[in-house]
Amino acid sequence: MKDGGTMIKTTYRANVTKDGAFWFIQLPSLENVFTQARNLEEIESMTRDVISLMLDIPSDSFDLEFHFDSQEESLSKML
């Protein structure tokens, strides 16, 4: 906890790669944890869902940092 009782949120890095019709999302800090999304709009919610399920924590209790494959780098600004 920070001074004043404010919780510091953990930030999870999500590596995102386009794979055919889907987006593949890997979480390097969590061994063997990954998910996929059908479109850009689903990337954040699918990532939050898998982290909250695997760690048994609320989906709003952490932050996310998305890193897109170099081919998709410009898309990172859209999320």
Image (cartoon, rainbow, N blue to C red):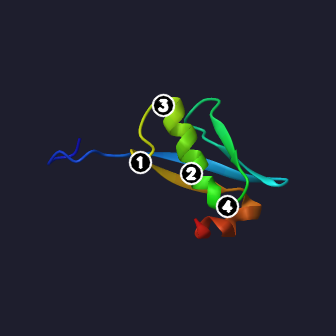
Mark 1 and mark 3: span between their CA atoms?
13 Å
Q: Residues within 10 Å of mark 1 (few under 14, many from 20)?
A: few
User: Which one is in front in this view, the residue at disc 2 or the one at disc 3?
Assistant: 2
Task: Tell me the SS state at disc 4.
Answer: helix
Which comes sooner in the sequence, label 2 or label 4? 4
Task: Tell me the SS state at disc 2.
Answer: helix
Q: Which amino acid type is shown beneath numbered disc 1?
A: Asp
The residue depicted at 73 percent of the width and 54 percent of the height is 38
Q: Which mark is residue 60?
A: 1
The residue depicted at 45 percent of the width and 44 percent of the height is 59
Which comes sooner in the sequence, label 2 or label 3? 2
The residue depicted at 52 percent of the width and 33 percent of the height is 53
As drawn, 8 above or below 77: above
Residue carrying label 2 = 45
Residue carrying label 4 = 40
As drawn, 54 above or below 3: above
Task: Tell me the SS state at disc 1.
Answer: loop
Mark 4 and mark 3: span between their CA atoms?
24 Å
Task: Tell me the SS state at disc 3.
Answer: helix
Q: Which amino acid type is shown beneath numbered disc 4?
A: Leu
Which comes sooner in the sequence, label 4 or label 3? 4
Which comes sooner in the sequence, label 2 or label 1? 2
* Spot occupied by residue 13 in the image (x, y as percentages of width and height): 55, 47
Q: Which amino acid type is shown beneath numbered disc 2?
A: Ser
Residue carrying label 3 = 55
* Spot occupied by residue 19 in the image (x, y as percentages of width and height): 81, 51
The residue depicted at 48 percent of the width and 31 percent of the height is 55
* Spot occupied by residue 16 in the image (x, y as percentages of width and height): 68, 52
